[in-house]
Structure formats: C-alpha cells, structure tokens
Image (cartoon, rainbow, N blue to C red):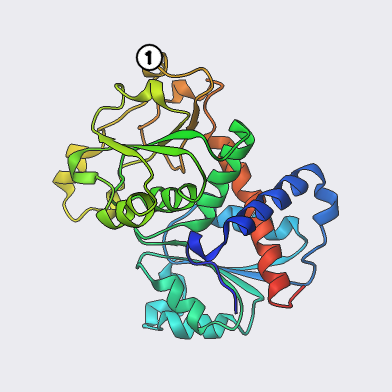
Amino acid sequence: MRSVIDVPDLSLEEIDRLMDTAEDIIAHPAVYSERCRGKKLATLFFEPSTRTRLSFEAAMYELGGNVLSVTGAGTSSAAKGESVADTAKTVSCYADIIAMRHPKEGAALVAANNASVPVINAGDGGHCHPTQTLADLLTIRREKGRMGNLTVGVCGDLKFGRTVHSLIAAMSRYENLRFVLISPEELKVPSYVKNECLKQKNIPYTQTTDLESVIGDLDILYMTRVQRERFFNEEDYLRLKDSYILTPEKLQKARPDLCVMHPLPRVNEISVAVDDDPRACYFKQVLNGKYMRMALILMLLKEAGRL
C-alpha cells in the first residue's frame, strides 16, 4: 500500500505532476468537486494543529468526500494505551485514507506499515512534514516561476524544524541551488540533513548567525519559529526565541522580488507590519497547501484502487 511519510517517497516527476494537478484544481475547481464522492479521510492528530488539519479536511470536502476526525490523544484510545499500529489497523476499517500527525518521530511510518489504506504523514515530531513541503514547493513555483537557479535562505530553528528538513530534502533535487542556513549556534541544521541532502550532492551552502548580512543575496527567505514544544529547558527557549525578527526595515536590504515564506504559526519572528509587503507569501502558502493536499489525496486513492 503506497503511503507518503517523507518527501523522498515521491519522485521528482511525481512532485511536478502533483503541482500540475494542483494548478489545474486552482483553474478548474468544479471539475474536481465530486472526485472523492463516497470516500472518507481520517485525520488522526495527536498533536495540536490548525492549518494542517483544517487544510486536509477542507481538501477532502472540496473533492466531495467526507472526514472522520480525531484531535488529541486524550480523545482517542491512545489515552488507554492503544498502540499506533493498532490504531492504524482499526481506522483502516472505517476510512479510505489516513492523514496522521504525531509527536513521536517515526509514528507515521509505524502507522503506514500496519494500515490497509494509504497513510499521509502530517508531521511526526521534529522529523519531517512532507505535505507542508509540497505547499512550499507550489508556492515557490507560483511565485518565482522556476524551481532551480535559486538562493534559498532558511532562518530560525533549523535543528528541530521539520519543515526545514523536508524543504531542504525536496529542493536539493532541483538544479543550480544554493542554501544559506541562518540560525543560532544551538539551533543549526542537523549534520545528517547536511550530509544526506547537501554534501552528498555537492550543493553549496553557507551557515551564519546574521540574517541582515545575507538577506540581500536571497531569492527565498523561509522563516521559522523557535519551537517551544521541542525544548527540554524553558530557559534555553526564552533565551533563543527572539533570535530573528523580520521587520520592514530589514526588508529594505532585500531584493524587490524576494519571496518571504513561513510554515506558520508565527509567534513574533515576522512583524505583522510585513504582512502588507508584496513579498510576503506565507498566507499564500496556506492556500497552496490545500490544493497540494487535494492533489496528493487523489493520487494515493487512485493508486490504491479506491477511486
């Protein structure tokens, strides 16, 4: 059974086809409004979420399907000690496809290995978040008109930021890219991400703690929040949480066609004064996420013989 747990589960050709499908959905929504009639998506969210859960549910509804939803471990049999494997087997009896978010790395893979329907990883701890990356890729293509020949800056919590790990893995498959990794020393990109995605492919990258010194070089600036829920020490979180705050003043040094992105939710790493800048693309990302999830649901249901 085909599931999507991490970005490499999809070939570059498949990602491009998903973006093509998403573009077609945007252009012709009525054509897709009954594609999933009679089908059910189960959203199993054992960790708080607004955008991801609602976009999955909106995606299924706009395809004409229905949604079964679990929000929080306390509202499910996980509170009684049920394993992820047993939950996946059980929910497979009720739904045609599962979207799952879980605080533990690897939980989505366990679910996929035990479910009898496709499973989409909607975020597993600090590991990866493939559908957010699909939203990011569509945003980049729609805003920049290309996927290669870009300088991509990622800024903030690069250690625990699963969206950053997935984005680097996905973008490293395109040609003529350069990455600028901007973070405090304590929150640098993990070595395995650099080794597997950048060094092995000879993709140039630089690391810095200073956003303002590099912002003028960037085609894409991907901001992230410092994630309180990933810290073991409150003191460390409070010391690092305001390391980078993007303001209109800092944007004066940036290119006029810079694309500013953020997986959201933001805390205060992007000033609300930036929202009216035409370079602010983070709410466009939210909408693009719905379209890419629609495309992915269609692809997996068709491959599973459920459409």
Where does residue 42 sit, x and y in percent of width and height? Answer: 60, 70
**In the rendered image, the vertical position of residue 304 relative to residue 146, given as above or below:** below
User: Label 1: which residue?
Assistant: 249
Provide the secondary structure element on which disc 1 rests. helix
Q: Residue furthest front?
A: 202
Where does residue 266 sit, x and y in percent of width and height? Answer: 41, 38
Q: Residue furthest right?
A: 31
Where does residue 218 sit, x and y in percent of width and height? Answer: 42, 27
Quarter of image, res 125: bottom left
Residue 70 visible, this angle: no
**In the rendered image, the vertical position of residue 109 relative to residue 280, given as above or below:** below
Residue 47 visible, this angle: yes
Position of the N terminus by quadrant: bottom right
| Label 1 Cα neighbours within 10 Å, binned few <14 / some 14-19 / many ≥20 | few
Q: Nearer the viewer, residue 93 or 281?
A: 281
Q: Amino acid at mark 1?
A: Glu
**In the rendered image, the vertical position of residue 271 relative to residue 71, given as above or below:** above
Position of the C terminus by quadrant: bottom right
**In the rendered image, the vertical position of residue 252 relative to residue 267, given as above or below:** above
How many numbered markers are drawn?
1
Q: Nearer the viewer, residue 237 or 6?
A: 6
Q: Residue at x 69, y 60 (%)?
A: 60
Where does residue 280 sit, x and y in percent of width and height? Answer: 52, 27
Q: Residue at x 27, y 53 (%)?
A: 190
Q: Residue at x 59, y 48 (%)?
A: 289
Question: Is residue 112 found left or right of 289 in the rendered image?
Answer: left
